[in-house]
Amino acid sequence: MSLRVVHCVGFYFPDQVGGTEVYVRDLAAALVDHGIESSIIAATDGAPREYSWEGVPVFRYPAKSDRTYFQKLVGRLEPDLFHLHSWTTGAGLEHLRGVAELGIPSVVTVHVPAAICIRGTALLEGRTACDGRIDERRCAYCWAEGRGLPAPAARLLSHLPKWTPPAWTARSPVRRIATLASARAMAANQAARLHEIAGLCGRIVVPSRWMHAALLANAIPAGKILLSGQAAGEAFDCGTRPRRGEDGLRIGFVGRLDAYKGAQTLVEAVLQIPAETRLRLIVAGTTDDLKNLRLIERAAQRDPRIELVGALSHDRIPAFLDGLDILAVPSQCQETGPIVVLEAHAMGVPVMGSDLGGIAERIRDGVDGWLLPFDDPRAWAAAMREAAADPAEVARRAANSLRTRSAGDIAAEMASLYGELAVKSK
């Protein structure tokens, strides 16, 4: 079946991108083999523009444009189906509503925990993995505690009546108090938005089992959810690569240097390892979180084994992984992915990862990686030190690190889903 699909994201190449945009790019390319023509529409803070990226047309629209503007853009492309991959103000529920008014069937892929969690991490009180069930009081308490409110005050706030602050408070000196007081209403709104999305789209696609369970816990019907895992792109191939450099064990991190990605855990761990231990930590990334960036920079200044190499474009990540013995993914939240774990394994690189969410689903502890407590730098330090002392064990886990899925597998699942929904809409 020949179909036209519009994929919608919050931003896109050539901007600095994350796993969602990589997923969309690889999916659009692989759908060609199924006779499906893709277009990308993505928000921008700049002026509207049109261009081609790797042979796929891309249309950028102002993030603050109104629904009518967005509908005209979508209508001009005449898609058979709309696929939303974002959960942002620039590409989210408001845009899905606009597409529904046009009568175009849609699919939503949930790439981030923010879809169910007002705190954004899906960690209950910041300490343990949450089941994802939206409960007004529990979520209000967790969110307020995460904003620095003492536990007794957060508990009291969670029992206040639901209240939505009037618009004028956003510009007043009491805006912080008003925001805190609206925590229960925020949680209730989150649940309502989730159910509205389920009602507007034909299917919700999730890349991890924990998110599938979370949607079920929020009373989203099982038939509305499709579990479809991610995959590394074809550029990621192990080939023949060196294992151990002259400078000892090479551990790498690549991604945002925001606190929730956990690079600070790695630098704290290295500082706990005796200086004579032969290893290097190579950190690739950037951030707008200046406080966390300064913490990481200060650690690098204290220990020459920590090297900061700045941000990498996605096309440079295969070469970066090729130079590592181990990739570290110390996320401080429940990820739905991340794709970089799969990219490392496709390159034959074992992964040290947090024992949370999608990371725990993708790493086989003791086989192709290490699962470690996300909030304990001492455990990471111990694992790094043991790996540095036992290159044979690192090599064994590297040999078990393999590609398990391709973009073609995802495209086959999406093509089947698109065809099903397109037929139903006629």
Image (spheres, helix red, strand yellow):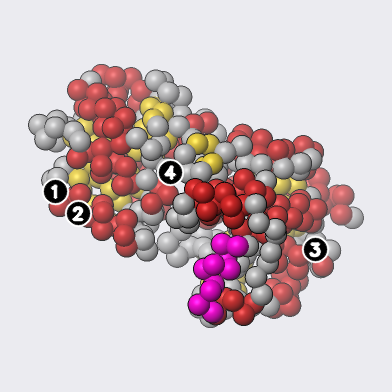
Mark 3 and mark 1 in contact? Answer it, CB < 8 Å: no
Mark 3 and mark 2 in contact? Answer it, CB < 8 Å: no
Crowding near pointer 1: few (<14 within 10 Å), some, many (20+)? Answer: few
The region drawn magenta spans 172-181
**Would residue 392 be found to the left or right of residue 139 on screen?**
left
Measured Cα–Cα span from mark 4 to mark 2: 20 Å
The amino acid sitting under disc 1 is Arg
The residue wearing badge 3 is: 100
**Marks 4, 3: nearer the viewer:** 4
- Mark 2: secondary structure: helix
* Residue 174 highlighted magenta (yes or no): yes
Residue 166 location in percent, x, y? Answer: 66, 75
Q: Which picture quadrant has residue 197?
A: bottom right
Measured Cα–Cα span from mark 3 to mark 1: 55 Å
Measured Cα–Cα span from mark 3 to mark 2: 50 Å
The residue wearing badge 4 is: 332
Residue 250 location in percent, x, y? Answer: 23, 36
The amino acid sitting under disc 4 is Gln
Crowding near pointer 3: few (<14 within 10 Å), some, many (20+)? Answer: some
Q: Nearer the viewer, residue 409 or 145?
A: 145
Residue 368 location in percent, x, y? Answer: 40, 25
Mark 4 and mark 3 in contact? Answer it, CB < 8 Å: no
- Mark 1: secondary structure: helix
Measured Cα–Cα span from mark 4 to mark 1: 24 Å
Please report whichever mark, 4 or 2, sits nearer to the chain's N-terminal start: 2
**Would residue 334 be found to the left or right of residue 315 on screen?**
right
